[in-house]
Amino acid sequence: MAQPTMTDERAGGALQPAAASTNAHVRQRNLSTVLGILHHDGPHSRAELVRRTGLTRSTMTVLTAELMEMGLIRDGPARGGSGRVGRPGVLVEANPEVAAVAVHPESDAITVAVVGLGGGVLRRVRYDTPAPASARETVRVVRSIVDGMSADLERDHRIVGVGVAVPGLVRSRTGRVLLAPHLGWRDESIAEALSKSLGRYVIAANDASVGARGESVFGAGRGVRNIVFANGTSAGIGGGVIIGGEVLNGTEGFAGELGHTVVDRNGARCHCGRRGCLEAEVSLQRLLPHLARTHIDEDELDIALGLSRDPALLAEVSRQAELLSEALTDFVNLFSPDMVVLSGYLGNLLSVSRERLTDAVRVHPVGGETRSVRLERSKLRSSLMLVGAAELVFADRVLPVTG
Ligand SMILES: [Zn+2]
């Protein structure tokens, strides 16, 4: 066999192993890119994958064959009625049998779901808790729900891990919860405890970061590189920031506590100890008395706000929208996002105060220049935390495509 010509003698014998490892690296990166496209953007024909990646047809044939052999993709639905001449494109898609278990503990419920590759929520169980469940109780409930599903899981799915979205401060490396005030958790090794109980890989993160990630890959922020995400729940406001396509973690994963931005120095006392934090002022709890309700879900609230002519309610909505708009302008100045996504209760406020809040992200007070920052309501709604928690697992265990 002829040796490859080497023009640089210094490369010597090291060239071949280095080249081999580069090839392995390129192959793995290509597999990961193709799987990522199918997982995040749905079924594609091989020709479309060639166009999107710039790889050759023959390389794509090899890559899709490999991913199929690994069981990560499968033949997709036939594309009908495309109006194209010739045979309809044969599609491939991410295999939803490859799935993650998503767990979302909240102050009034624990939700467990099975989410397939491709981002579809395949099963969902909500377990109502009259009071916030302790970490130990949460592990017990999740274990019993997963046990209840186990026959179906083993028959229909290949579970690659468990993702947990926790409303609190979570150490990104260990999945340890330092503090989840609305659950009453302090220093809980939730990922480790669940992993021990379920015998599976478990990853945990702050729920707003999880939401930001979910919305950026499957929701309103699809394909957007820089996103500020804020989520309002009955317990408070969480934030997540995505810069250059990556979730901003900060030290140990604690970045993005947007709810504790002070919007009124003389405002209500926040549980963090300060006064006038965004989450103490812009709050569903402060709206509920006007609606004569103790609890309301996002869809019901849309209707209630759309119908109400109660001046006291409208004044409170207006007050909160004003304070939220102040905070949004700060967020735009701090992070310079392409898009701001509001979910949960903040999504409700956006729908009734769109003009005012849109102005808040459009006007750039520094220099008075107008910027085109898009303001969107979350698209994934009640699936957001589940899809986002599953994505933690997919991003870590499946998309890198090893093997
Ligand atoms: Zn605070």
Image (cartoon, helix red, strand yellow):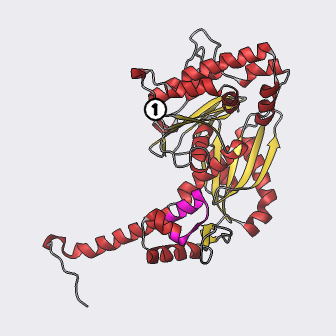
Q: Is residue 295 left or right of residue 4?
A: right
Q: Amino acid at mark 1?
A: Phe
Name the residue rendered at 14%, 73% in the picture.
9
Question: For residue 281: magenta?
Answer: no
Residue at image point 68% right, 27% down = 349
* CA neighbours of label 1 inside 10 A, class few (<14), some (14 to 19), many (20+): some
Q: How many marks?
A: 1
Left or right: 132 with respect to 186? right
Mark 1 element type: helix
Q: Position of residue 133 (x, y in %)?
A: 76, 37
Residue behind mark 1: 335
In the rendered image, residue 347, in percent from the top left (x then y), is placed at: 67, 33
Q: Is residue 44 magenta?
A: yes
Magenta stretch bounds:
34-47
Q: Is residue 271 left or right of residue 140?
A: left
Q: Toward the viewer: 173 or 230? A: 230
Residue found 77% across the figure and 17% down from its top: 313
* Vertical placement of residue 110 versus 259, above or below: below
Q: Is residue 129 visible?
A: yes
Where residue 181 sits, quadrant-wise, is: top right
**Foreground pick, 383 / 9:** 383
Q: Residue furthest top?
A: 266
Q: Is residue 160 above or below residue 213?
A: below
Q: For the stretch drawn in magenta, what is the main secondary structure? A: helix
Residue 358 position in % (x across, y down): 58, 28
